Image (spheres, rainbow, N blue to C red):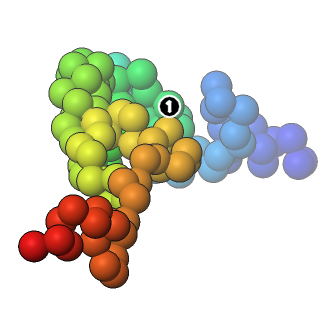
Amino acid sequence: MHENYCYKNLYRCHCGDVVEKKAKQAHDDEKHTLLNCKFCGKMYEKPKLEEHEKNCDNRPKICEFCENEIQVENFQSHLQMCGSKTNQCPRCKKFIPKRDWKQHTATPCFVPPEPISGPNPNPKANAN
């Protein structure tokens, strides 16, 4: 009796899910519709597409210097260009390339000594 009900009303999908026959189309639409990856264009079943897009080799990458999203094919040239831009160090006032910024700020950079204040230490200058 149970086997007859299952045989008449249920369907075992190739993915392993057991689905009512009347819901087969909805199951196929939800689980097995093929969609294109927006980064590489390859076709994936709907549930697998999200995971693929998280790890797709063509997914844009974030530039560590400007934090913009850069297409993978332009990424290396962008890093070279963006890392060459400079920021002025507030301590030593030198202009440091962005690619060297972390290293520069992690070490004490040269800060020029403060000028000596008070009477002029050169006695000849005070003679007049």
In the image, residue 31 above or below residue 121: above
Residue at mark 1? 55
Q: Say which residue appears at 29% left-offset and 40% top-offset.
A: 96
Q: Quadrant of residue 3?
A: top right
Q: Residues within 10 Å of mark 1 (few under 14, many from 20)?
A: few
Taking the spot 75% from the left edge, 38% from the top edge, the residue there is 7
Question: Visible in this render: residue 41?
Answer: no
Q: Please give the name of the residue rendered at 25% of the width and 23% of the height, measured from the top-left corner.
A: 80
In the image, 127 versus 104, the foreground residue is 127
Q: Secondary structure at mark 1?
A: helix
Q: Residue furthest front?
A: 127
Q: Position of residue 1 (x, y in %)?
A: 89, 48
Query: For this view, does 73 lie left or right of residue 48?
Result: left
Quarter-wise, where is residue 18 in the image? top right
Q: What is the residue that sits farthest to the right in this orientation? A: 1
- Compared to residue 106, the image places residue 63 above or below, namely above
Image quadrant where one finds the C terminus: bottom left
Asked whether 86 or 30 is in front, the reply is 86
Q: Residue 74: x and y, percent?
A: 21, 22
What is the quadrant of residue 11 in the picture?
Answer: top right
Where residue 40 appears, x then y in whole percent? 30, 22
Q: Is residue 109 left or right of residue 36?
A: right
Q: Residue furthest bottom?
A: 118
Residue 36 in the image: state x and y as whole percent: 30, 29
**In the rendered image, is residue 58 in sight?**
yes
Residue type pointed to by label 1: Asn
